[in-house]
Image: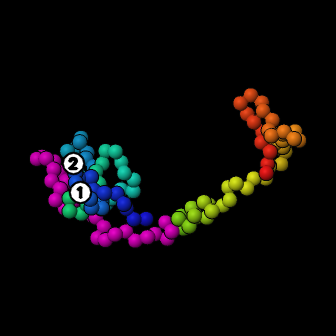
Amino acid sequence: MGSIRQCSRSACQRAAVATLTYVYADSTAVLGPLATYAEPHSYDLCALHAEKLTVPRGWEVLRLALPSGPPEPNPDDLLALANAVREAAVDRTAPEPAPPGSKTPLTPPPGEQGARRGHLRVLRER
């Protein structure tokens, strides 16, 4: 699936293509492909800001290979999407059959709108 995350730089509206993380113990900035998930201590950058990245004096930049184009849809992504749509289409209002050996649900007495016990109420099926 394609990324819809934006560049972390102020006032930049471009789509993010790279993720920047800092390794403070080694005085290193790591710039690599866009991470799968947005992390709180990393920065998503567009291609322009990733290319123009500078770091403080004495720091090292480790640049990992960035993708040359937008990511291609993966067949696994398409299957996951199709499965999610199928699952959402299942009628969730239909009662599930009771497993063997389970107790049957309570039913209100005939002519009653619903039996009330404490804060619970049994309603008639329609």
Among the 4 quarters of the image, the one containing residue 105 = top right
Verify CB contact (< 8 Å) between mark 1 and mark 2. no
Q: Amino acid at mark 1?
A: Cys
Image location of residue 33, percent across then percent down: 31, 60
Among the 4 quarters of the image, the one containing residue 47 = bottom left
Q: Amino acid at mark 2?
A: Thr
Crowd tier of the residue under label 1, counting other residues whose Cα lies within 10 Å: few below 14, some 14–19, many 20 or above: few
* The residue positioned farthest toward the right in the image shown: 110
Asked whether, in this view, residue 45 is left or right of residue 125, the answer is left
Q: Image point 49% across, 66% down: which residue? A: 77
Image label count: 2
Image location of residue 101, percent across then percent down: 84, 45
Q: Is residue 40 above or below residue 52?
A: above
Q: Is residue 55 visible?
A: yes
Q: Image point 75% across, 36% down: which residue? A: 121
Instruction: Find disc 2 in the rendering and name its residue.
Output: 28
Looking at the rendering, the stretch of residues picked out in magenta corresponds to: 50-78
Instruction: Find disc 1 in the rendering and name its residue.
Output: 12
Q: Is residue 76 visible?
A: no
Mark 1 to mark 2 CA distance (whole Å): 24 Å
Crowd tier of the residue under label 2, counting other residues whose Cα lies within 10 Å: few below 14, some 14–19, many 20 or above: some
Q: From the viewer's perspective, is the residue at label 1 or at label 2 nearer?
A: 1
Considering the whole magenta stretch, tell me its main secondary structure.
loop
Q: Image point 13% across, 47% down: which residue? A: 56
Depth check, front residue: 75 or 106? 106
- Residue 95 lies within the magenta run: no
Image location of residue 12, percent across then percent down: 23, 57
Element under disc 2: strand
Which quarter of the rendering shows the N terminus? bottom left
